Image (cartoon, grey):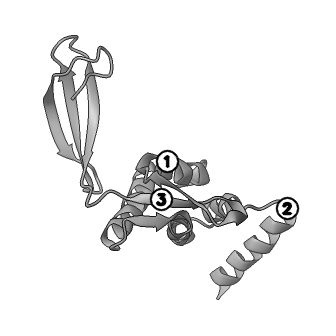
Amino acid sequence: MRCPFCAHEDSQVKDSRPTEDGTAIRRRRQCEACAARFTTFERIQLRDLTVLKSEGSGGENRREPFDRDKLVRSVSIACRKRPIDGQQVEKLVSGIQRQLETGGDTEIAAQRIGELVMQGLKGLDSVAYIRFASVYKDFTEARDFKEFAGTVNEVAKG
């Protein structure tokens, strides 16, 4: 593993342990050249996934590799200042990634990923759910929030 401080190629593993949700191995490493310590995470990847993003009304799709960190960032933004800890976000994202990897397709529409996030956030926190929906569904006016929040409240009451 390359050292992030001096770029030396060799490091020594000082400690390994599973993450709390059991979806990764956390390794504490020390560079053999500069003695700096850093942490890496090792995760199982069943297959390489490609995300298909629509490019407007032309029907063209842009392809990009699935980026787990990007998904964690977007879910974390929706959950900011909510009673949701990092472990819950990691568990949600790991579950979504596992669903995508075991689904059989290697190319996944961005819309499908958004739907899975919405589904996960709906059960986790209604405010985070509405925040994510505002970006995912491209809310343009305050009325959009009000209408969507009304549907969330109706579901919660029913």
**Visible in this render: residue 132?**
yes
Query: Along the polypeptide, which appears first: circle 2 or circle 1?
Result: 1
Quadrant assignment for the N terminus: top left
Disc 3 and disc 2: Cα gap in Å?
Answer: 30 Å
**Visible in this render: residue 137?**
no
Q: Residue at x 82, y 59 (%)?
A: 140
**x then y, percent, for residue 7:** 28, 18
Amino acid carrying mark 3 in the image: Val
Disc 2 and disc 1: Cα gap in Å?
Answer: 27 Å
121 relative to 149 in the view: left or right: left
Query: Along the polypeptide, which appears first: circle 1 or circle 3?
Result: 3
> Does 155 sit above or below residue 42?
below
> Does 129 sit above or below residue 9?
below
Query: Along the polypeptide, which appears first: circle 3 or circle 2?
Result: 3
Between residue 146 and residue 97, name the one nearer to us.
97
Amino acid carrying mark 1 in the image: Lys
Residue 70: mark in rendering: 1
Element type at marker 3?
strand
Q: Residue at x 64, y 88 (%)?
A: 158
Amino acid carrying mark 2 in the image: Ala
Label 2 near label 3: C-beta < 8 Å?
no
Element type at marker 1?
helix
Between residue 36 and residue 56, name the one nearer to us.
56
Residue identified by numbered label 3 = 51
* Total number of numbered discs in the rendering: 3
**x then y, percent, for residue 3:** 26, 22
Q: Residue at x 33, y 65 (%)?
A: 101
Residue 89: mark in rendering: none
